[in-house]
Image: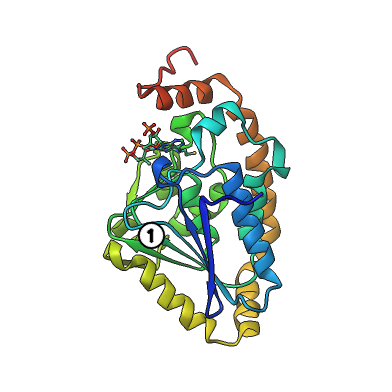
Amino acid sequence: MTTPDILQHTEGGVLTLTLNRPQRKNALTQAMYATLAAALQQAVDDGAVRVAVIQGQETLFSAGNDIEEFLHAPPAGTSSPVFDFLRTIATFPKPLLAAVCGPAVGIGTTMLLHCDLVVAGDNAAFSMPFVNLGLCAEGASSLLLPQLMGYHRAAEALLLGEPLDAATALEVGLVNRVVPPQEANATAQRLAAKLAAKPLSSLVETKRLMKGAQQPQVLQRMAEEGAIFGRMLREPAAKEAFSAFLDKRVPDFSRM
Ligand code: COA
């Protein structure tokens, strides 16, 4: 399953995956997750790929999971494309970069916890509104976010669900650098080219040494979150939140 909503380009050892569904704010569908996962899985053994980059456009990274799919075709269990994508980025052995401008909602932010370097446009807004949608944390964010920024800041991001701006994301270590939006993709490409010129086995071994010990725990947490998330997707609070978003009204949780 591949989709034109993901553009793929390999040049100079760098695989670039561009989220390309601007009419839906790059909301991610199962077809998009499947395409991203397949491209990255293929890149693991592809000698022509040394580094991968995920990017959007100058005003937009991703509105997170497609809410219509959440409502009408929620992912079924941990064998679904979204969980395949999450497991793939959590175990991707080569350097993985992201360039983020504009909104990065839900998995648009949690996927960054699995990237090695993140470049943000100064217009980036990172938000994880899972609780506001009647859902719970995903992508191992319940484990990795408190480790990254401390419990209280993680609680603010995950419980209140309010966005972090680019400066805050830099301060808490979610991103490596902040640049003008029109330079974000080019900056990520420059960093990717720098990495692609280095000995691949040194990159792979060093990444494995940094992340390998925690990987089983990350995968276990993803599965645990996934089981709860999958149940909550089908419950009244989430259905009300999704319907309200699509109907452009405020959700009513008063009876839940
Ligand atoms: N799933 C499906 N459609 C989405 C979407 C999503 N996650 N995000 C945006 N869209 C659609 C909107 O319904 C709208 O469709 P329309 O043109 O038919 O009305 C279109 O994309 C443009 O979105 P809009 O909300 O008008 O853009 P905006 O610039 O005002 O706001 C966002 C952008 C990303 C802040 C806002 O769209 C948003 O909050 N999206 C939902 C994010 C979310 O909760 N994701 C799930 C996380 S688990």
Q: State whether residue 119 is above or below residue 209.
A: above
Q: Position of residue 178 (x, y in %)?
A: 31, 65
Q: Quadrant of ligand 1?
A: top left
Q: Position of residue 211 (x, y in %)?
A: 62, 68
Residue furthest to the front: 4
Task: Identify the residue position indicated by label 1 in the image.
Answer: 172
Q: State whether residue 124 is above or below residue 24.
A: below
Residue found at x 51% / y 47%: 107
Kind of residue indicated by mark 1: Val
Residue furthest to the top: 255
Horizontal side of 104 relative to 66 (left or right) equals left
Horizontal side of 34 relative to 27 (left or right) equals right
Nearer-the-camera pick, 236 or 26: 26
Q: State whether residue 42 is above or below residue 129.
A: below
Tell me where residue 208 sits by quadrant: bottom right
Whether residue 138 can be seen here: yes
Residue found at x 43% / y 73%: 189
Nearer-the-camera pick, 162 or 42: 42
Residue found at x 65% / y 70%: 93
Q: Position of residue 223 (x, y in %)?
A: 68, 45
Asked whether mark 1 lies closer than 8 Å to ligand 1, one says no
Nearer-the-camera pick, 50 or 8: 8
Whether residue 90 can be seen here: no
Residue found at x 40% / y 63%: 175
Mark 1: few/some/many CA within 10 Å (<14, 14-19, 20+): some
Chosen colour scheme: rainbow
The secondary element bearing badge 1 is classed as helix
Q: Position of residue 66 (x, y in %)?
A: 51, 38
Q: State whether residue 101 is above or below residue 48.
A: above
